[in-house]
Image (cartoon, helix red, strand yellow):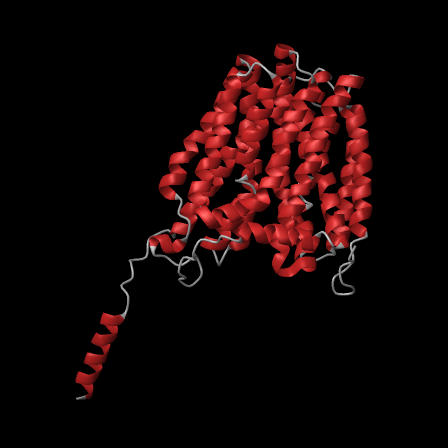
Amino acid sequence: MLSGVTQTTDSAVTERAPRRRSRPLMHRAWIVAAVTFVTIIGGAAFNALPGLLIDPLNTEFGWSRGEIGLAVSLDMALYGLTAPFAAALMDRFGIRRVVVVALGAVATGALASVWMTASWQLLLYWGLLVGLGTGSMALAFSATVTNRWFVARRGLVTGVLTAAGASGQLVFLPLCAWIVKDHGWRPASVTVALAALVVVPFVWLLMRDHPADVGLAPYGGAYVEKPAPVTGAAKRTVRVLFDAARTGPFWLLAGSFAICGASTNGLIRTYFVPSAHDHGMQITAAASLLAVIGVFDVIGTVFSGWLTDRFDARRLLAVYYALRGVSLLFLPMLMAPTVHPPMVFFIVFYGLDWVATVPPTLALCREQYGEDSAIVFGWVLASHQVGAALVAFLGGVVRDVTGSYDLVWYAAGALCATAALMALFIRRRDTATAVTL
């Protein structure tokens, strides 16, 4: 009797239980992460171009470096200002659709620039189209993928996807430099467009918006239903900005991170190659040095994350900005026609410091703003790109007026000292609430 009851009960449970698919050798989340990694590399290909094309465009069209820098600055500004809304777009329309459109915008802008004849077209193609496209694949893209597809290994995946941008720089900078030197700037621009287009089929075929789309649980977690499209995320993004803007720590974080962008993307990424070329260095050699920075910024970022877990984030930021400022003050004296040991030391040192500021800045956002910290960091990241945009424009103007980039390096060094002081003025959340302005 008992045996019969047991068999009947087991049978009923079996009939009611949902059928599970056989477990694959590799969880689909890792495939999605790999596609995300490749996509970020493809989108980052354009970031290798601006510093390489300033001199060729100036020579062919006679456009001033200020005009060219204005297009680069528009690209950087839109990259930053689009980022806070990218997550909202992905919640509303899905990751796959947003990323495919973004890649199409990057490819269109890069390809259309081949036929440009006026500087306003440079603003439209490089600034507007590429800026919106790359901004839609910024930090929000990797964060959204990680949050949806992973519960375990989130830190590892976040670190790897963050490194994708540096990997793209490492791959495309030497390649594009060689193409520009031997074949001209137009084939290099076409190469960037093709890099973005090649990724599109992989995104469309292999990317999925949510694990529930393929009947899976996120890696290391329990199965959850796919949420309905969110329609109010953009409004929340703006609301969080206004709330944070009423506090003192936000302006200190945003101001210091704007200086971070000014002294990295706006300055080194845009003007290191043309500045080295002004001193007689071959463009391929200068681009290779810039690519090496991408190797060491991965190491520096991981180590900075480890330090952030153990030391005061404010003091770490102050040290990072102070050391960066000192290194920039010495850079004009290191410029030479050939690569020499002091320059190599600068490249390694600066590479370790390049994005080391990200982990402590993110940690301070979490400390100050709790649940809204991710959105606040998105706006702080926007300030980073606005700072980069200003220097990308002003650096070209300074070169046009003075015939040298030296003044830009010195000014950036002084700004980094200011950022170091700003970091020390950020109050601890546990000892005092954020100062309301």
Query: In the shown orientation, is residue 421 left or right of residue 154?
Result: right
Q: Is residue 170 visible?
A: no
Quarter of the figure with the N terminus: bottom left
Which residue sits at x=57%, y=20%? 121
* 428, above or below 319, in the image: below
* 76, above or below 280, in the image: below
* 30, above or below 53, in the image: below
Q: Quadrant of residue 184?
A: top right
Q: Quadrant of residue 49?
A: top right
Count of marks overlaid on the render: 0
Which residue sits at x=56%, y=41%? 138
Quarter of the figure with the C terminus: bottom right
Which residue sits at x=51%, y=24%? 110
Query: In the shown orientation, is residue 70 left or right of residue 157?
Result: right
Q: Quadrant of residue 394?
A: top right
The answer to which of 264 and 323 lies nearer the viewer is 264
* 221, above or below 53, in the image: below
Q: Position of residue 392 (x, y in %)?
A: 69, 29
The answer to which of 131 and 176 lies nearer the viewer is 131
The answer to which of 62 and 192 lies nearer the viewer is 62
Q: Is residue 27 visible?
A: yes
Query: In the shown orientation, is residue 197 left or right of residue 325?
Result: left
Which residue sits at x=62%, y=40%? 81
Q: Position of residue 120 (x, y in %)?
A: 60, 20
Q: Position of residue 8 (x, y in %)?
A: 19, 80
